[in-house]
Image: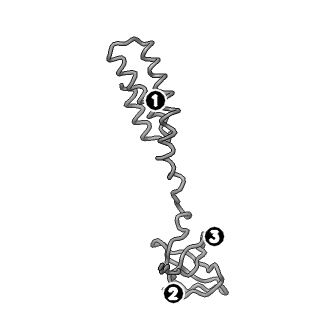
Amino acid sequence: MGLAIILFIAEIMTPGGFVLACLGISCLASGFISYLGFGVTIQLLIFSIASLTLFFGIRPFFSKYFLQSAGKIKTNIDALVEKIGMVSERIEPATGKGRVIVGGEDWKGISVSDEVINVGSKVTVVRVDGAKLVVKEHQINRGG
């Protein structure tokens, strides 16, 4: 039972994909069989059957439904794409000047279409190019 608790704690602290949880549940099943008075051979058999059943039967279900969104979360500069910001210094493609504020941070901004974008205009980040944000003027979607 102690090993089951240790495995559950380790599962929480590691990105193992429910492997340690499967073994923890198997330890609980084996511990219950021990409580009922069965011998070590039966305990090992129950542990093995439970481990295999959970690992190949239940784990794929949990992995599919609980871990599917893990790869879809954007972080760092990837999270800036499609964000809306505001021009703080006029974007002039001819001179290479221009600044935008996105998420409270000030970035060098360049226009995706090489058009001038004035101060105060809302922009949408198209992509990140090094330390520069490539932006376009924000289009308001007025569905209807």
Query: Going by the image, does 94 lie left or right of 107?
Result: right
Where's the N terminus, which quadrant? top left
| Residue at figure coordinates x 53%, y 81% from the top left | 139
Label annotation for residue 23:
1
Q: Which mark is residue 129?
A: 3
Residue count near mark 2 (Cα–Cα under 10 Å), binned few <14, some 14–19, many ≥20: some
Disc 1 and disc 2: Cα gap in Å? 59 Å
Give the residue drawn at x 53%, y 60%.
74
- Position of 135 compared to 103: left or right? right
Task: Please provide percent x and percent y for residue 56.
Answer: 53, 32
Q: Residues within 10 Å of mark 3 (few under 14, many from 20)?
A: few
62 to 87, vertically: above or below: above
Q: Which colour scheme is used?
A: one colour
Relative to 60, does residue 91 appear above or below in the rendering? below
Question: Residue 102 at x, y = what percent?
Answer: 49, 73
User: Which SS class for mark 3?
Assistant: strand
Q: Which of the two labelled residues, at mark 3 and mark 1, occupies the earlier sequence position?
A: 1
Between disc 1 and disc 2, whose residue precedes? Answer: 1
Of helix, strand and loop, which one carries label 2?
Answer: loop
Type of amino acid under label 1: Leu
Report whether 56 appears left or right of 11. right
The one nearer the camera, 132 or 37, is 37
Mark 2 lies on residue: 119
> What label sits on residue 70 in the rendered view?
none
Most extreme residue toward the front is: 144
* C-alpha separation, residue under disc 3 versus residue under disc 2: 21 Å
Q: Callout 2, which amino acid?
A: Val
Q: Do the residues labelled 3 and 2 touch (CB within 8 Å)?
A: no
Q: Kindly identify the amino acid type of the residue bearing the numbered disc 3.
A: Asp
Q: Quadrant of residue 81?
A: bottom right
Instruction: Check contact, mark 1 vs mark 2: CB within 8 A.
Output: no
